[in-house]
Image (cartoon, rainbow, N blue to C red):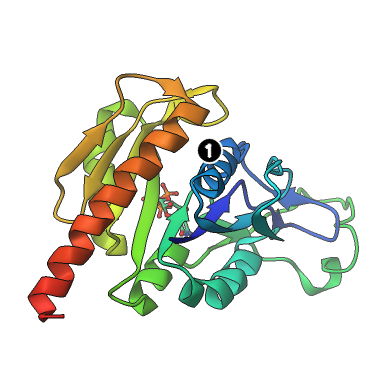
Amino acid sequence: MRLLITAGPTHEPIDAVRFLGNRSSGRVGTALAETAADMGWDVRLLMGPYAMVPEHGNIDIARFQSTADLEKLLEKHLPWCDMLIMAAAVSDFTPVVPKDCQQTKWRRGDDAPILQLRPTPDLLKGCSERARADQTLVGFALEPDETLVSSALRKLERKAIDFIVANPLETMDADRIAATIYARGGEAIASTDGPISKQTFATWLLDQLESASAVTLRECRSSHGT
Ligand code: CTP
């Protein structure tokens, strides 16, 4: 199994020294990469700024800062993988940086500065549009408890991916994680027994994805008569 995994936050530049970021620690992505490497999978990890570097020696690592950097890395590495797990907390918006601030600092002036944001592309949706039928795409949905299931299912549909891992919002930056995996079509295929450590979660998720994607691939092959 060739696994491509993204982890950590994005930093969207405001000027040459400032950025717009988020609180993702990248711990889930790093634990998944280490666990997959322990299981003998080939692993490429695309890591955001400050995300924890795995100790495992057998993982190829490439770093990104912004959503635009990650988009380029995904273009390069997607064709290589059997499975993509998008655990990175990708920014939905990026600042419009005035030309005269790109190489320098945005200076204090007489008026309050106004930060203009534009939407970033949905990277996972872009991947699903160009992925091969034999590639498995997995996304995460971090949402408030009340809307967790409906939002996760909407994202699964909109991004046209194979699986989505739904986590309550409190998971970000926490030590433990609770999750349910939904497959294309909206069926819940597995849930953790309440919150578990991120290490235990990594093993659980990879086991679930390995068996679920094997079933999907078998069905896909038999429907194509291959
Ligand atoms: N994601 C992505 N590109 C983006 C934003 C998110 O590929 N610009 C990926 C994330 O890595 C994650 C999944 O999409 O695997 C869901 O991310 P989330 O931020 O929860 O959803 P959004 O696509 O931003 O949808 P919404 O704005 O409705 O929350």
Q: Is residue 4 above or below residue 205?
A: below
Q: Is mark 1 within 8 Å of ligand 1?
A: no
Q: Residue at x 55, y 22 (%)?
A: 175
Quarter of the image that includes the N terminus? bottom left
Toward which corner of the image does residue 129 lie, by quadrant?
A: bottom left
Rendered location of residue 105, percent (x, y) = 89, 58
Comparing 87 with 203, the one in front is 203
Quarter of the image that includes the C terminus? bottom left
Residue 122 in sight in this render: no
Rendered location of residue 52, percent (x, y) = 69, 40
Rendered location of residue 223, percent (x, y) = 8, 74
Q: Residue at x 71, y 41 (%)?
A: 55
For label 1, the crowd category at 10 Å Cα-Cα, with few meaning under 14, some 14 to 19 and many 20 or more, is many
Residue 73 in sight in this render: yes
Q: Number of marks in the image?
A: 1
Rendered location of residue 69, percent (x, y) = 66, 67
Q: Residue at x 42, y 71 (%)?
A: 127
Label 1 sits on residue? 28
Q: Is residue 103 above or below residue 50?
A: below
The secondary element bearing badge 1 is classed as helix
As drawn, is 181 to the left or to the right of 32?
Answer: left
As drawn, is 45 to the left or to the right of 111?
Answer: left
Q: Residue at x 16, y 49 (%)?
A: 186
Comparing 99 with 79, the one in front is 79
> Which three-letter amino acid code belongs to the residue tagged 1?
Val
